[in-house]
Image: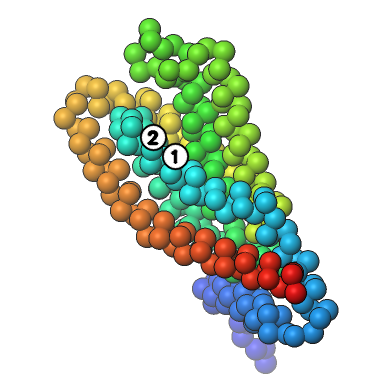
Amino acid sequence: MSCPRRTADPKSSSSALSLGANQHRSFRRANTRLAASSDTPSDTDTDIQKNTKKMSPLAYVNESTKFIVSGACLAVLITHPNVPVCWCLSGSVFNSLNSKLLKRLINESRPDGATKLDPGMPSSHAVSLSYLSVYAASALLLRGGGFPDVPGAWPVPVQGVQPGAAALVTAGLFLTWLRVHLGYHNWAQVCVGYGIGSVTALGWLWCGETIIGPSLVSNPASIRYLYWLVGFTTLIFLPVSLRWSGEARDWFVKRREAKAVKRE
């Protein structure tokens, strides 16, 4: 008499994978607390060595990047509240939300030793940095060099267009590389994030130049909907900025503690 074969339930398999990832992060969190509570000199020396890179001058650059970039975006929005700027910045918020959603769906852990324990695939920094740098560089190539003869052109001389675009992309690549160098992500996580942000930037720019821009020119009254969109995305961004401030405060506290331990 043959026994009936049991088939795997796809939902239970997916739940098991998610549970396994969560258990792995819980295990890492427990190990982090255990290491922090250890008083042996060898453990203390090891922790200092691991944290040296995360407290280096490059770590200051990494930690301040989000505030500098966000401040620059806000300054551009205040001084140039036009259609291209509003369209670009509203897309950056939706791009960031997309990366957060993918993180939860993929649920891949960060590298061992990372100070953050939330999922790491894709890198949110890589997604945002690539979007802003690729969008700004592409828009500069489209609109730079024709001022003041071409309507809507940016006040950038012709000889500065290509070097400026290259500098924007290089800055985005460097700041993305920092996430791997400082141990927050692995190469796969930042490469996937950079690809997502770049594709989103090019698609959003194309949509703005070929669809949104011409439609707003033909119907200027509809510009108010774009301003409403910017206001909505700004409200979404406010809680994120508050969380960033808390993370930065915690980071500088850890920095002072590391310096105190090193002096001892």
Q: Are marks 2 and 1 in contact (CB under 8 Å)?
A: yes
Instruction: Give the residue at mark 1.
Output: 72
Residue drawn at point x = 59 percent, y = 33 percent? 169
237 and 111: which is toward the camera: 237
Q: How is the image coloured?
A: rainbow
158 w.r.t. 249: above or below: above
Q: Which mark is residue 76?
A: 2
Q: Could you tell me which secondary element the residue under label 2 belongs to? A: helix
> Residue most toward the top?
149
Q: Quadrant of the N terminus?
A: bottom right
> Residue most toward the left?
221
Kind of residue sitting beneath label 1: Ala
Q: To which quarter of the image does residue 263 belong?
A: bottom right
Kind of residue sitting beneath label 2: Val
How far apart, in angstroms, are the residues tagged by discs 2 and 1?
6 Å
> Residue most toward the front?
263
Residue drawn at point x = 26 percent, y = 26 percent? 215
97 w.r.t. 72: above or below: below
